[in-house]
Every structure is written in C-alpha cells, then in structure tokens.
Amino acid sequence: VQLQASGGGLVQAGGSLRLSCVASGRILSINDMAWYRQAPGKQRELVARISSGGLTTYADSAKGRFTISRDNAKKTVNLQMNSLKPEDTAVYYCNVDWGYYMADGSIVQQKDYWGQGTLVTVSS
C-alpha cells in the first residue's frame, strides 16, 4: 500500500495550486484523510482533514483559502489552495487512517500513514 502525492510546485503569491494524493494497494477502507505541511525549521502541522463522510476541519491559516475534498471511489484526497502566501511555503504531506490487507490476508488498521511530501514554494 502506498500514498502518492503530486501537484506541488513554484507559484507566485496570490496564485493557486491543487495537490492530489492517491492511495493504492490492497485497501480495505479509508477513514480520515488529511494534508499536513512542514516549513523549514518548523514542526509539521495539520492543514486540513476530511472524514469518510465528508466532514472537514481546517487550520485557521487555511480557512477561506484552501478546500479539501476526496473521491472515495478513486481513493484520492485533494487540496485546492487559492490566494497562496509566501508563508504557505512548505512540504505538504498526505496522511490517512486506513485498513488494508497483508499478503497473508490479515487486516491491518493503521492510523497516521504518511505519503511522501510534495514541495510547495510561494514566491513574493
């Protein structure tokens, strides 16, 4: 099982980016999906979270500018980021709570599974 994030890049302040994260493998179910970010010299922080039923939570810094969404059929979570600011510069990570099958057919329930990061750089 793995999470593959994409969509990062360099953008000017005021611009937009859309991050996507696709889950793949022998997945049983996906509960919460989330985006975190980590800026240089800072701790990793929650940006937005979405439950399996579509309930969303945002960091104060993301409210009104970012929108998290998911497609359960495609096992993806997206983060639409508008009105980007230089302080949004960070590596963005997707994160899931999920259950998946091992090779022997057993089931693992795991919280806080991390994908690789995607770098977002916002220039002033």
Image (tube, rainbow, N blue to C red):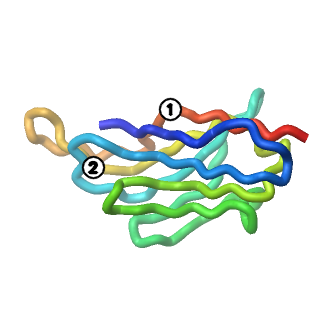
At horizontal 28% and vertical 47% (from top left) the residue drawn is 109
Residue placed under numbered mark 1 in the picture = 116
Amino acid beneath label 1: Gln
Task: Give the percent coordinates (x, y) of residue 83.
Answer: 80, 57
Label 1: which secondary element: loop
Task: Give the percent coordinates (x, y) of residue 18.
Answer: 61, 52
Left or right of 54, for residue 44? right
Residue extending farthest to the top is 41
Left or right of 14, for residue 28? left
Q: Nearer the viewer, residue 78 or 40?
A: 78
* Residue 89 higher or lower than 56, as above or below: above
Q: Quadrant of the C terminus?
A: top right
At horizontal 75% and vertical 61% (from top left) the residue drawn is 60
- Between the residue at mark 2 and the residue at mark 1, the CA separation in whole angstroms equals 19 Å
Residue placed under numbered mark 2 in the picture = 99
Left or right of 44, for residue 50? left
